[in-house]
Every structure is written in structure tokens, then in C-alpha cells.
Image: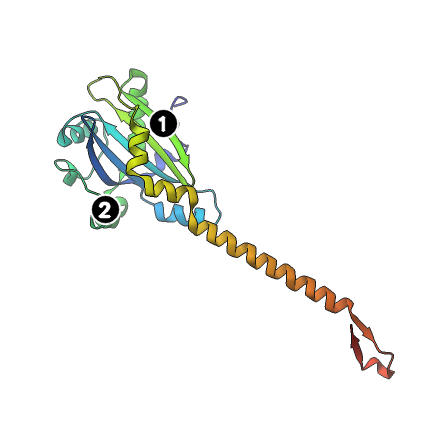
């Protein structure tokens, strides 16, 4: 596994399929860890949590053939995507998300396929990080034809541009950091004012010290 850039927790993760494309005589599947909202929230609150996203390219011209090739490798996909795949409409994404873990694909199965074929030249895996997003690009050639992964970075950048931009900038996290900084400054200011008031108090010398003069 040393030649594969997966994290130690990848095998225990599960991934929701959100989108498919026909591109470069291949079928491309986009998965996101099914706990992506939790991961996003954790990162927003300052924890080092990444949302894992997979772009899996299967070098077969037809949706059904690519689906069957993955099935032979033990990778289970929603059977409704076998013939026509998925678009990336909000409605489709909502339906996929609503399936929760019951409609997900196992990271363990994806990892097993990659480990099985990386030494035979049928699989390549690359990973990069864009802010709180960890992006895996996997290219799989079921028939052993030459892997065509050179254009995948451009493909991902084009078709995942908005999410990558959000991952890099993470405006919600930046807002929370700004609010925390303001609160820290306010607390520091109040502390300084309080110290000044305490140091400016003097007893007037009146009997019983009942009168206090402030400077």
C-alpha cells in the first residue's frame, strides 16, 4: 500500500455517488464522503478534518460496461446508474444524499481494487488537497489499455471549480476566525479598561474611607 496515497482512514469511509460523465471514451464517477457535512462543519470550527472526494475514471466507452467492470472488482454502485448515470442537478444530489450510508460505496472496496491492480498498470491514483477538500483521482483500465490520466487535473478543475474555490477560501471559516479575533480584541480592551479603573482609585482620607476619588 506504500505506493498508494490513501489515508489510513480511507478504508473505513463510505462514499456517495453524485455525478457521472462520459469523457475521453471513458465513464467518470464523482464520489464524496457521505459524512461531508460533518467534515465541513468540523473544519469550519477549526478541527483538521478533510472532506474526501473521488474522481474515478473507468476506461470503457459505455456506462453499463463501466458499471459492470467495477462490479466485477467488488465495487457496488447504485444499480439505477448502470445505464444512464447521474446528472448533477440539485434534485439528484438531494436524492443521493437522502440514501445516507445505505446507498454508498465502500472505501475498502475501492482501496482493494487499487491495491490489486496498481502493480499491473491497470490503475493509477493521485491525490491533492484544496483547503478542506482532499481530492483523489483514480484511473482504471479494466482491459489493460494504456492509462489516460494526463487530462484529469484539467477535467477536475473545470467540473469541480466552484467546490475547489470554496475549499481553498472557506468563507465560513474565515468569518468565524474574524469574529473570534474581534471578540478577542474586545475582551482585551475591556481588560485594559478594567485595570485602568482599578489603578485610578484612591482613598480620599475621609474618616472611614467612605469617599473615593477617581482620576
Q: Where is residue 182 drawn, in percent x and y?
A: 56, 57
Q: Where is residue 111 drawn, in percent x and y?
A: 32, 29
Q: Please determine whether, in this image, residue 129 is positioned above or below residue 213.
A: above
Indicate which disc, 1 or 2, sits on the residue closer to the N terminus: 2
Q: Quadrant of residue 185?
A: bottom right
Q: Residues within 10 Å of mark 2 (few under 14, many from 20)?
A: many
Q: Where is residue 79 drawn, in percent x and y?
A: 15, 38
Q: Please determine whether, in this image, residue 74 is positioned above or below residue 167.
A: above
Q: Residue at x 47, y 50 (%)?
A: 174
Q: Where's the N terminus, which quadrant? A: top left
Q: Any mark on residue 96, and which?
A: 2
Q: Please determine whether, in this image, residue 3 is positioned above or below residue 176.
A: above
Q: Is residue 70 left or right of residue 158?
A: left
Q: Any mark on residue 177, and which?
A: none
Q: Residue at x 78, y 69 (%)?
A: 200
Q: Is residue 181 left or right of residue 125?
A: right
Mark 1: secondary structure: strand
Query: Coloured how?
Result: rainbow
Q: Quadrant of residue 190?
A: bottom right
Q: Nearer the viewer, mark 1 or mark 2?
A: 1
Q: Where is residue 211 drawn, in percent x and y?
A: 80, 81
C-alpha gap between disc 1 and disc 2: 26 Å
Q: Residue at x 17, y 29 (%)?
A: 66
Q: Residues within 10 Å of mark 1 (few under 14, many from 20)?
A: some
Q: Any mark on residue 126, and which?
A: 1
In the image, 133 versus 157, the foreground residue is 157
Amino acid at each position: 500500500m506504500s505506493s498508494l496515497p490513501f489515508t489510513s482512514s480511507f478504508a473505513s469511509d463510505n462514499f456517495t455517488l453524485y455525478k457521472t460523465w462520459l469523457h475521453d471514451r471513458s465513464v467518470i464517477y464523482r464520489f464524496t464522503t457521505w459524512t461531508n457535512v460533518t467534515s465541513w462543519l468540523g473544519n469550519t470550527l477549526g478541527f483538521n478534518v478533510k472532506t474526501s472526494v473521488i474522481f474515478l475514471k473507468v476506461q470503457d466507452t459505455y456506462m453499463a460496461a463501466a458499471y459492470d467492470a467495477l462490479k466485477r472488482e467488488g465495487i457496488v454502485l447504485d444499480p439505477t446508474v448502470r445505464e444512464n448515470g447521474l446528472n448533477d442537478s440539485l434534485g439528484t444530489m438531494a436524492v443521493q444524499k437522502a440514501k445516507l450510508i445505505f446507498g454508498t460505496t465502500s472505501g475498502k472496496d475501492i482501496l482493494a481494487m487499487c491495491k490489486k491492480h496498481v502493480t499491473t498498470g491497470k490503475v493509477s491514483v493521485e491525490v491533492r488537497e484544496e483547503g478542506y477538500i482532499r481530492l483523489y483521482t483514480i484511473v482504471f483500465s479494466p482491459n489493460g489499455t494504456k492509462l489516460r490520466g494526463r487530462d484529469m487535473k484539467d477535467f477536475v478543475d473545470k467540473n469541480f471549480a466552484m467546490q475547489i474555490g470554496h475549499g481553498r477560501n472557506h468563507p465560513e471559516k474565515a468569518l468565524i476566525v474574524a469574529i473570534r479575533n474581534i471578540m478577542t480584541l474586545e475582551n482585551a480592551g475591556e481588560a485594559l479598561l478594567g485595570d485602568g479603573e482599578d489603578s485610578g482609585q484612591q482613598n480620599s482620607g475621609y474618616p472611614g474611607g467612605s469617599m473615593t476619588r477617581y482620576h
